[in-house]
């Protein structure tokens, strides 16, 4: 198995929204804000090459939304999903599977593109199976008022219309530490605090357990338990899930792959008198 970081773009979000009730004087120690209170964010996806499988985890925002839409997120840098895939010697047609941790626009927007005539939409990965789960799909296609603006129909419904949508088994009873196989060698932890049935892919790589932690732990600055996003639909459940998972990660030396940290790709954590804290930071290529 080979793992490649895929940076689909960089953007900014309000730091207060990203850290909820935590005072700005604390969260700016790890995530400095600009004059508009915005912090830097990455859309860092993961490409997994394993035998005949070439699996992409998440797809970033994409590029099909309006100029007004993107103006809210202060996009910066030269990274792109397709360009990053090409940098590693692959094309979008080579992708066999796309695992979507959840269907918020910054995680699935690159899954669907305009067609050549800009009259409709088509899958960005025409040869791939797209993986979600029934609980989250229902949640996203019948959205609550809190998350409705994050579940964009143009990102979601064309996946099903293409016939490429597949579901991972999930009966809703799994705890954060239980795993369900998505594909050979790749399993999912399920977390329900940020949004219903978010999937966190896990795999063995160079004798280490690597977990793509998505929005359970968006940046290294979110490691302390109370540091929760204002975007979480069930923050107390996130608190519980995060505490259980990070303790397990510390005790088993998991490699945590960070999707939104602008600078740090991977971390390990350790138990301390103050709770679980950052241990080491590094890149996949350092393993």
Image (spheres, helix red, strand yellow):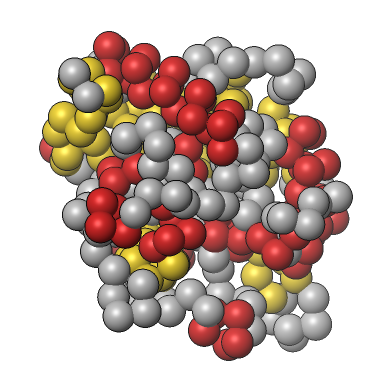
Q: Is residue 138 left or right of residue 192?
A: right
Q: Position of residue 254 (x, y in %)?
A: 30, 22
| The quarter of the displayed image where residue 182 is located | top right
Asked if residue 90 can be seen in this view, the reply is no
Q: Which quadrant is home to the N terminus?
A: top left
Say which residue appears at 60% left-offset and 35% top-offset: 193
| The quarter of the displayed image where residue 212 is located | top left
Compared with 62, 28 (above or below) is above
Q: Is residue 167 left or right of residue 266?
A: right
Q: Position of residue 65 (x, y in %)?
A: 63, 78
Q: Is residue 276 left or right of residue 120?
A: left
Q: Position of residue 162 (x, y in %)?
A: 80, 55
Q: Which quadrant is home to the C terminus?
A: top left
Say which residue appears at 39% left-offset and 62% top-offset: 15
Say which residue appears at 50% left-offset and 15% top-offset: 177
Say which residue appears at 80% left-offset and 82% top-offset: 119
Q: Is residue 121 left or right of residue 181?
A: right
């Amino acid at each position: 198995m080979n793992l490649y970081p895929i940076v689909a773009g960089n953007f900014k979000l309000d730091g207060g929204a990203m850290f909820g009730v935590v005072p700005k004087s604390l969260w700016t120690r790890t995530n400095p804000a600009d004059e508009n209170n915005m912090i830097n964010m990455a859309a860092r996806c993961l490409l997994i090459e394993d035998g005949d499988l070439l699996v992409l985890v998440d797809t970033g925002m994409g590029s099909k939304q309006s100029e007004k839409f993107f103006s809210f997120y202060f996009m910066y840098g030269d990274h792109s999903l397709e360009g990053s895939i090409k940098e590693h010697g692959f094309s979008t047609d080579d992708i066999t599977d796309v695992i979507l941790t959840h269907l918020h626009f910054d995680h699935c927007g690159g899954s669907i593109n305009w067609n050549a005539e800009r009259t409709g939409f088509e899958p960005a990965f025409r040869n791939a199976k797209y993986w979600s789960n029934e609980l989250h799909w229902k949640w996203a296609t019948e959205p609550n008022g809190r998350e409705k603006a994050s579940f964009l129909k143009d990102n979601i419904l064309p996946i099903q219309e293409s016939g490429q949508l597949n579901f991972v088994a999930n009966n809703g009873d799994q705890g954060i530490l239980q795993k369900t196989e998505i594909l050979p060698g790749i399993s999912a932890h399920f977390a329900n605090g940020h949004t219903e049935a978010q999937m966190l892919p896990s795999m063995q790589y160079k004798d280490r357990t690597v977990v793509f932690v998505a929005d359970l732990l968006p940046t290294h600055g979110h490691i302390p338990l109370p540091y929760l996003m204002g975007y979480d639909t069930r923050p107390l459940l996130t608190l519980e899930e995060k505490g259980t998972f990070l303790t397990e990660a510390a005790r088993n030396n998991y490699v945590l792959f960070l999707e939104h940290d602008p600078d740090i790709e991977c971390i390990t954590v350790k138990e301390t008198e103050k709770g679980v804290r950052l241990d080491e930071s590094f890149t996949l290529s350092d393993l």
